Image: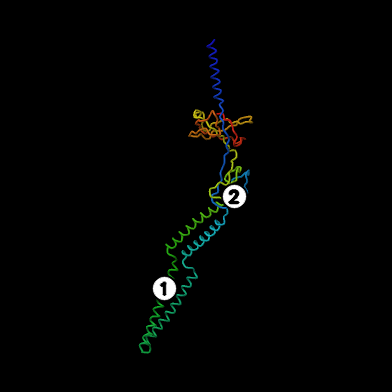
Amino acid sequence: MKSTLFLILTLLLISCQKQQSEDKIITGYIEEELRLIASPQSGWIIESDIVEGNRIQPGQLLFRLDNENQVNEVKILEKNLEAAKAGITDLQKGVRPDELKSIKAQLQEAQSRFELAKNELVRAEKLFKKGLLDESKLDTAKSNKDVIAAQIKSLQSKLNLAQLGARPDQIIQAQAQAESIVSQLSIAKYNLSQRDVYSSVSGVVKEVLYHKGEYVQSTSIVLKVQLPDMNKVRFYIPQSELVNVSLNQKISVSADGMSQPVEARVSYISESAEFTPPVIYSNESRDKLVFLVEARLSADSSLHAGLPVDIKL
């Protein structure tokens, strides 16, 4: 009789312990998923109609920085590039037609003067032989002919060079300068585009840290946006419970006032232990090393950020 009673008590105790283990509840809390939208550059905010509570969509303008300097820089570089391209075209074609025409006219005029100077020298030589002309005047006639001949040679070289166009190294140098301007223009256009900040996500604006008329530094957070249906539950477990938790595992989450628990999937398990954080601190859990676990709630969950919840593994 005693042995039978002892066996019954033992079975009841084991059953209770198993039930307690199966029904073990872990305390956690709901955390919202935020995106921090920063300013890519420094500047004055000249346009922003966003306020807390606004719903935003991808492609929506969030705020605009002053852009006068960036616009001017793009305009200057565009003009410089246009001039550089025109310069390359001129070098490849050679001298412009009107300039070429002018050189030819100068050459023809010099050739005419050379014929006159040559005839004048012949006449001077005849007069000198007859003793009717001083030697100095003969020398002047010779010098005049030589000067004009040198002018003709110079103009002919100038004409030949003009008809050939620029040297290859000049064209290569001009092309390199144009490519450098193209690179500068690309950077300038990118910098201009960064003055307008658009949303890349859908969500609700939770906080606006800078407003229209304020100066913001580069990389400073301007808006905090809560992503829709992206809340997660965070809780901590002791090392002994790690074996019972795995990634993508389904867990049950409940809170006061809920008629039915909601489902979540484990999305993160910390690899390092830490002391029990104050948010779940209690006499039972103090001085214990625990591991952080995060689980993604289902999209239709109505649990709000900051709400304490109970988790059942």
Q: Which mark is residue 63?
A: 2
Residue 206: % across, % down: 60, 42
15 versus 109 height, above or below: above
Q: Position of residue 75 (x, y in %)?
A: 54, 59
On the picture, is 9 further left or further right than 151?
right
Residue 289 x, y percent position in the rendering = 49, 31
The answer for how far apart the CA atoms under marks 2 and 1 are is: 65 Å
Q: Residue at x 55, y 23 (%)?
A: 20
Quadrant for residue 303, please give it. top right
**SS for tag 1?**
helix
Q: Quadrant of residue 112?
A: bottom left
- Residue 172, placed above or below residue 49: below
Residue at the limit of the structure toward the front, as seen here: 283
Density class for disc 1 (Cα within 10 Å; few <14, some 14-19, many ≥20) is few
**Viewer-proximal residue among 186 and 65:** 65
Could you tell me which quadrant the N terminus lies in? top right
Q: State the residue in front, 8 or 203.
A: 8
Q: Are marks 2 and 1 in contact (CB under 8 Å)?
A: no
Type of residue at label 1? Answer: Ser
Amino acid type of the residue that numbered disc 2 sits on in the rendered structure: Phe
Q: Residue at left 38%, top 80%?
A: 143
Q: Element type at marker 2? A: strand
Which quadrant of the structure image shows residue 29? top right
Image: 269 above or below 162: above
- How many marks on residues? 2
- Marks 2 and 1: which is nearer the front? 2
Crowd tier of the residue under label 2, counting other residues whose Cα lies within 10 Å: few below 14, some 14–19, many 20 or above: many
Disc 1: which residue: 154
Residue drawn at x 41%, y 73% as measured from the top left:
154
Question: Is 193 or 89 nearer to us in this picture?
Answer: 193
Q: Which mark is residue 294?
A: none
